[in-house]
Amino acid sequence: MVDDSKVAAAVLASIFKKQGLANVFTANSAAEALRILGADQPEALESQEEYDLIMLDIVMPDMDGIQTCSAIKSVERLRDVPVIMTTGLTDFESLRQAFEAGAMDFLTKPINEVELMARVRSALALKAEIDERKAHEKKLLEITARLSAANKELRRLSSLDGLTGLANRRLFDNTLEKEWRRGLRQQTRLAIVMMDIDHFKLYNDHYGHLAGDECLKQVAGALLTCLRRPGDLLARYGGEEFVALLPDTDKAGAMLLAKYARVAVEGLAIPHAGSPVAKVVTISLGVASSIPQSGQNATELVEAADKALYRAKGKGRNQVVAGSLQ
């Protein structure tokens, strides 16, 4: 309740309290009102009280009610608080300016108590509806944000291998196509390293499938440490097979990474009593690199790496063999 007349403010405040409206604040100047509302300190708005209605006299000495109303409505937190102007003026220009400043209603002095409470309760009902709508909107935004986060996580999980946490075959295929098209546009190299755990069936037969799963996870972790750049992708290709997709990498670079990977897996020293290759788990690797050309497709690069892997197995396993794209 803002009125430069302390008597008028006190009378209206007593009417409000008699009608059961608690927490009535009074101010006798615009400056005092702006201070109470927190409109003079925008940076401190979060700590201010919430208000449901402002009764504002138009004629005040320091700043008139129209200017005060504009100042209040310029504050985001107070924008939806209804303002009822009280005035002894009867000229339409003052009322027009009051409504343009953001007032929702006005009362002409002397104020009738019945009319006052009818206008006040109407304004409070409007504020309650606004608050309910804003709370509903906030809840919807929170639900939307949670759904968006859940969908994002679902998409991420759908692109990962459940056992090793690496990219799955689908993500690899999609990324391969994207990188192939980029290489075709920019004429940059793309390399593939196919990897297979040597005699993994014998490992499962000897140690059991639970141990086999643990072996796959350890091998995946070791291979992951060999990737050097954010654009490189390591995926579980299927069963005991892994594949690395290396954009902007020539054959020499891919061979170097493959050699690191072979050593990293052997360095795990996972016992493999059933292997005719070594006493520990080892891998065989095939490498292929190419600058994508029109008339070729990405699967040809994968096939070239796979053929190189097949030759590595034929040559005794636990080694790296380079292939070429015909």
Image (cartoon, rainbow, N blue to C red):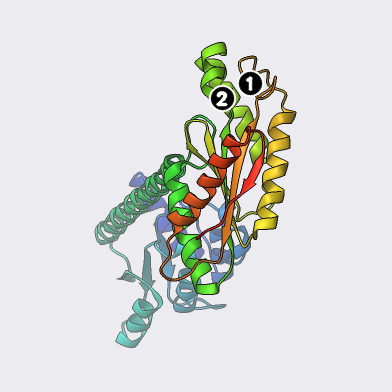
- Which of the labelled discs sits on residue 199, or is there none? 2
Q: Say which of marks 1 and 2 sits in front.
A: 1
- The kind of residue on which mark 2 rests is His
Q: Is residue 12 above or below residue 185?
A: above
**Residue found 42% across the figure and 49% down from its top:** 145
Q: CA distance from mark 1 to mark 2?
A: 8 Å
Q: Please name the residue that numbered disc 1 is placed on.
A: 276
- Label 2: few (<14), some (14–19) or many (≥20) C-alpha neighbours in 10 Å: some
Q: Nearer the viewer, residue 149 or 324?
A: 324
Kindly identify the residue that appears in the image at 37 percent across and 49 percent down: 144
- Label 1's element? loop
**Left or right: where does residue 84 sit relative to residue 200?**
left
From the viewer's perspective, is residue 33 above or below residue 99? above
Q: Secondary structure at mark 2?
A: loop
Residue in the foreground of this view, choosing between 205 and 95: 205
Q: Marks 2 and 1: in contact by CB < 8 Å? A: yes
How many badges with numbers are in the image? 2
Q: Is residue 290 left or right of residue 10?
A: right
Q: Residue at x 52, y 59 (%)?
A: 325
- Image point 51% across, 42% down: which residue? 167
In percent of width and height, residue 257 lies at: 69, 48
Towards the viewer: 56 or 49: 49
Amino acid type, label 1: Pro
Using the rendered view, name the quadrant where residue 279 is placed: top right
| Residue 202, above or below 225 | above
Earlier sequence position, callout 1 versus callout 2: 2
Placement of the N terminus among the 4 image quadrants:
bottom left
Position of 113 relative to 110 (above/below): above
Q: Residues within 10 Å of mark 1 (few under 14, many from 20)?
A: few
Decide if residue 7 is in sight here.
Answer: no
